[in-house]
Amino acid sequence: MSDVLLLATRKGLLTFARDGAGGWALTGEAHLGNPVSNVVTRDDLWIVALDHGHWGQKLARSRDAGRTWEEIPAPAYPEGAIKYDVFKGTQTDATLEYIWVLTAVGTRIYAGTNPGALFYSDNDGSTWHFNEGLWNHPSRPRWIGGGKDTPGIHSIVADPRDPARMWIAISSAGIFETRDGGVSWAPRNVGMRTDYTPGDKTPEIGHDPHLVAPCPAHPDVLWQQNHCGIWRSTDGAATWVDIAEAQGPARFGFPIAAHPTDPDTAWVVPAHSDQKRQAVGGAICVSRTTDGGKTWVALRNGLPQHAAYDIVYRHALDVTAGGARLAFASTTGNAYLTDDGGDSWRCIGQNLPPVYALRFT
Amino acid sequence: MAYVRFTRHLHRYFPTLVDHEAPAVTVAELIARVNLRHPGLSAYIVDERGAVRKHVNIYVDGELVRDRTRLSDPLADGSVVDVIQALSGG
């Protein structure tokens, strides 16, 4: 299990580490005062996305596990790239607005951005390439913002069996798959619903997946926390099955974590509906399924059960390789950790800045 | 020659940054010259299309630049250019 936990927060990158006595303590701070929208690591390589209020989106890289940092170029949209506003009917220059997710796949680093674009780097972020195939998808003029003014990519999932195959998720458009290394992309939203639209509830495009998480040992099993519930696929996103609780908290939320080896186990951190977006009933819980989503158990041991208003963002829940240690953190600045798959939790940080993302290294 | 002055906020990212003179006849040319002296600095002021960032303001002789997209505002010999963060950025 990883003994180091990184928190990308509104006020910098915070490092927590397990001490000799089994507790967790803050051991590092970097980029203090700057919002860190996401973080990715590969061994001692750490890359953070910085969301400066004034100076734009930047990337910083450390090659020594956070001891020293250097700025590296941020992905740049090519000359002539146009973004669409479906509501205003406008087309304007596309420029980098936000780096929503960074994902390492082997030696390659991917970046998902707003407005919805996919970039990759094969030199640890020194230079970035723009995926033309996705950008030129004929459905892109119909992509809309989900929680932001422009559509964004927040989930990048590689198939460990096939380097040419990959899935990405866009809020709001849906899930797309490539089988030819990113040259062409096809929507994979069959079985999903858009409860928020009048008329057709099962369009090909227009879905709002909040996060897609794969089971690494069973790559055809994908889990999805969606704006309209929770879905699971066992056929590589060809079809999706609604697995949300009809009665119970496991329905709305943002993050979802898949067990590394057990294809039937996953965790979500439920929230009260898209109208309120806060802890359900003032109580924080993590819901776990161990039967592929047929049933869910709300895990509450060690979590606040009254006067809690926390919301957990989509990248702020993570699970380690063994599937026993998980951690999550909220925009209210509380962080919790379990070593027994969620049966019991302990608080490892309070009064932290709002947390955007959390990753074990 | 124009004289360019920078908000102290940028010194965190460019510690050697100082106000200085630079030969330029437009604001865009000035930003390009500033970037030669401090590589990477222009990306803090303008986006990848060269438009001034939403929450950055540039003043020429006390007046806000008019052309935020291309920064074509002319500079006179002795113009003073200020680059500051806008309050709208928080």
Image (cartoon, coloured by chain):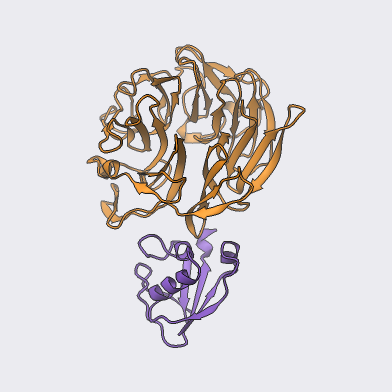
Chain colours: A orange, B purple
Q: Residue A53: x, y in percent?
A: 52, 56
**Which quarter of the image is occupied by the C terminus of chain A?**
top right
Q: In this orientation, which residue lies closer to the viewer: A60 or A11?
A: A60
Compared across the picture, whether A322 is left or right of A92 comes to right
Is any part of residue B2 visible from this angle?
yes
Q: In this orientation, which residue lies closer to the viewer: A113 or A352?
A: A113
The image quadrant of residue A178 is top left
Is any part of residue A52 visible from this angle?
no
Q: Is residue B87 above or below residue A173?
A: below
Q: Residue A163: x, y in percent?
A: 35, 30
Q: Is residue A156 above or below residue A132?
A: above
Task: Tell me what residue is drawn at x 53 percent, y 48 percent.
Answer: A61
Q: Residue A75: x, y in percent?
A: 41, 51
Task: Tell me what residue is drawn at x 68 percent, y 35 percent.
Answer: A17
Q: In this orientation, which residue lies closer to the viewer: A60 or A209?
A: A60
The image quadrant of residue B46 is bottom left
Compared across the picture, whether A110 is left or right of A297 comes to left
Task: Tell me what residue is drawn at x 27 percent, y 54 percent.
Answer: A91
Q: Residue A177: x, y in percent?
A: 31, 31
